[in-house]
Image (tube, grey):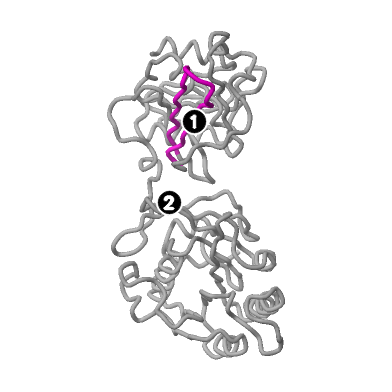
Amino acid sequence: MARTPTGHDELDRVLGGGIVEGGVVLIGGDPGIGKSTLLLQALDSLQRTGQKTLYVTGEKRRPGGPALAPPGAGRLPGEGAGRNQLEKILATLDATSPAVAIDSTPQTVYSDQLTSAPGSVAQVRECAAHLTRAAKASGTCIVLVGHVTKEGALAGPRVLEHMVDTVLYFEGDTHSSFRLIRAIKNHFSAVNEIGVFAMTERGLKGVSNPSAIFLSQHNRAGARQLRDGDAGGHAAMLVEIQALVDSGGPSPVACRSAWTATAWPCCWPCCTATRAWPAWTRTCSSTPWVACASEPAADLAVMLSITSSLRGKALPKGFIAFGEVGLAGEVRPAPRGQERLKEAAKLGFSVALVPKANAPKKNDKAFEGLTIHPVERIEDAMNLVRNLA
């Protein structure tokens, strides 16, 4: 399927290579996260390649704050249509025939054919249906912008998500300049891709090497610390996992990922439930409960990190581990293991502990400088780490 690049590699990767003619995209995110900034930059890039663009907004103010707007945003690339009446929007689309059109306030759009208020289920469904038909008939790619509620879901009727071709989430920590974009629905491509942006004074800039950002920059391996290989889409991304076990009380362990910068939710006692877990750790008065549901390949890294904390000894410098651990103590292979190892070698890691099934079958220059230790069971991994440390 033919695609038109937006000029932003991170966004194009999540979209599956670029925008699709006649496609309808819904992008959601917290207010002020940078949705308008990202889309304005994309429109600016598209216009520079000769594509005609249209920005529709029901708000009177210029979208995107002046401090975060990309160069040229004061002129609003394309034509600005400050209207929220469906019939006028459709007439503008028909008259201008843009390659890409963005509606930044779809919940305020209304049709004169309905008596219900803007934002109601009937209005959203009717307006979305008309815009979708217009996109398919004209070949214009239409992008709708939504906000995210406190629960993390897109605000407004969920019917909007079901009517579009692609749903993207643009998210990030308010205390960090980094932003993450991911797809949860895409009729034209896979949904396992992740894009990373950094918010700068001149707008959003794609991050070509996100692994380096989400790993500590210290030169010495800190105590109770471990790095785990986490694959996102076609590009492997490394994150850091830290664990601290308090042996003086029953408080559960908090395993923290530098990727999300939040504690992992408690779900199941992966450590004490594993029969191969050393007996001396079960005598500890604290009970470590850890959830690795979103990335089972982090099991091995989490368990080794907890062991490091219990022993009070740092893991080797330049150490990385990944693999799923079963309740019987077996270390299962992780998906895209070769990509994880190549990313680790590229970033300068020297020692890798991986499932036996993920070990390279032959010598590969991509793994130069990285000593790979394959293991089949968790006790083998424990013994190996003990000898390395």
Going 44% across and 34% down the picture, which residue do you hit?
A: 342
Going 58% across and 34% down the picture, which residue do you hit?
A: 266
Quick one: label 2 or label 1, which is nearer the N terminus?
2
Region of the chain picked out in magenta, as a range: 238-259
Front position in the image: 284 or 75: 284
Q: In this view, does 39 lie above or below 285?
A: below
Q: Where is residue 83 in the image (x, y as percent from the top left)?
A: 52, 86
Secondary-structure class at tag 1: loop
Q: Position of residue 51 (x, y in %)?
A: 45, 77
Left or right of 119 in this view: 5: left
The quarter of the displayed image where residue 70 is located: bottom left
- In three-dimensional space, the C-alpha distance between marks 2 and 1, rounded to whole angstroms, equals 19 Å
The reply to whether the magenta stretch includes residue 90 is no
Residue on which disc 2 sits: 173
Q: Is residue 212 above or below residue 149?
A: above
Q: Position of residue 121 (x, y in %)?
A: 70, 73
The quarter of the displayed image where residue 120 is located: bottom right
Dot 2 surroundings within 10 Å: few (below 14), some, or many (20 or more)?
A: few
Residue on which disc 1 sits: 254
Type of the residue with mark 1: Ala
Q: In this view, does 254 lie above or below 73?
A: above
Front position in the image: 26 or 3: 26
Query: In the rendered image, which quarter contains the C terminus?
Result: top left
Type of the residue with mark 2: Asp
Secondary-structure class at tag 2: loop
Q: Position of residue 331 (x, y in %)?
A: 60, 21
